[in-house]
Image (cartoon, rainbow, N blue to C red):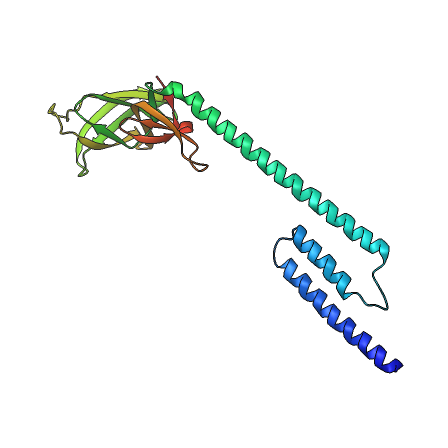
Amino acid sequence: MTTSVNNNVGNTGTSNTASTASATSAALGNTMDQADFLKLLTTQLQAQDPTNPTDNSQFVSQLAQFSQLASTQDLNTSLNSLSSQITGALQTSQVLGSVGLVGRHVLVPSASLSYAGSALSGAVGITNTASDVQLVIKDGSGKVVRTLDLGAQQSGLANFSWDGTDDDGNPVPAGDYSITAADQGGNALSTYADGTVSGVGYGGSDVGTYVQVSGVGGVPLSAIAQIN
């Protein structure tokens, strides 16, 4: 009889151990939360060896860990909620603060000009003092229609204006024209277009606050090079 009881206890211990291991593996497969922790704890209690039950001090320690886990997750939830509220408030504040730009002229990065019959202006970004800067304007087919010689320029933004005529003084048709700029050494320079801000909005976390600029489109607020 004694042998039979020992065998049953051994089988129970082996079965319970396998059950505990299975529950542990399932819980560790994902991020552990309160439900997983409680499941492990209850599985452990159900699977304990009747001849060697879980020590009370260990049980209390595990309950303390469970309480600490719950407190930590509650704190993380609160911090995430607070962070979202602060982010939302900052976004709203930035959009509202940018409303004053509506109707103002701004210089924004652009590799093209949208000509509709009126003179256009923009700027070239000069990184170092240049003895000669040229701006080349091309039509949709890639043909050069106008070359503007801006001469020597100090570092900063060198403004330009185009009246919509080609190098022979003939008016060009309305449309989009590409612009490129280079210094005397042929080094490419950044180009900017001047446009009027017609609206302000928020384009999500990837874009942030943006302004709608005539002739250019939506431009991130941080990309504005100059406000006139």
Task: Give coordinates of residue 49: x percent, y percent.
Answer: 81, 67
Residue for point 24% across, 29% down: 113
Task: Give coordinates of residue 200: x percent, y percent.
Answer: 37, 26
Task: Give coordinates of residue 155: x percent, y percent.
Answer: 38, 22
> Is residue 155 at least partly visible in the picture?
no
Residue 25 sits above or below residue 116 on the image: below
The N terminus lies in quadrant: bottom right
Q: Decide if residue 61 is on the left or right side of residue 39.
A: right
Task: Give coordinates of residue 93: x percent, y percent.
Answer: 48, 24
Residue for point 70% across, 54% down: 37
User: In terms of depth relative to the viewer, which is nearer, 153 or 49?
Assistant: 49
User: In terms of depth relative to the viewer, which is nearer, 26 or 145?
Assistant: 26
Q: Quadrant of residue 25?
A: bottom right
Residue 179 sits above or below residue 52 on the image: above
Residue for point 70% across, 68% down: 19
User: In terms of depth relative to the viewer, which is nearer, 43 or 221?
Assistant: 43
Residue 31 sits above or below residue 166 on the image: below
The C terminus lies in quadrant: top left
Residue 110 sits above or below residue 46 on the image: above
Q: Decide if residue 144 is on the left or right side of residue 10.
A: left
Q: Residue furthest front?
A: 1
> Is residue 4 at least partly visible in the picture?
yes
User: In terms of depth relative to the viewer, which is nearer, 167 or 123?
Assistant: 123
Q: How many numbered marks have been drawn onto this rendered protein structure?
A: 0
Q: Residue furthest top?
A: 228
Q: Decide if residue 96 is on the left or right side of residue 45.
A: left
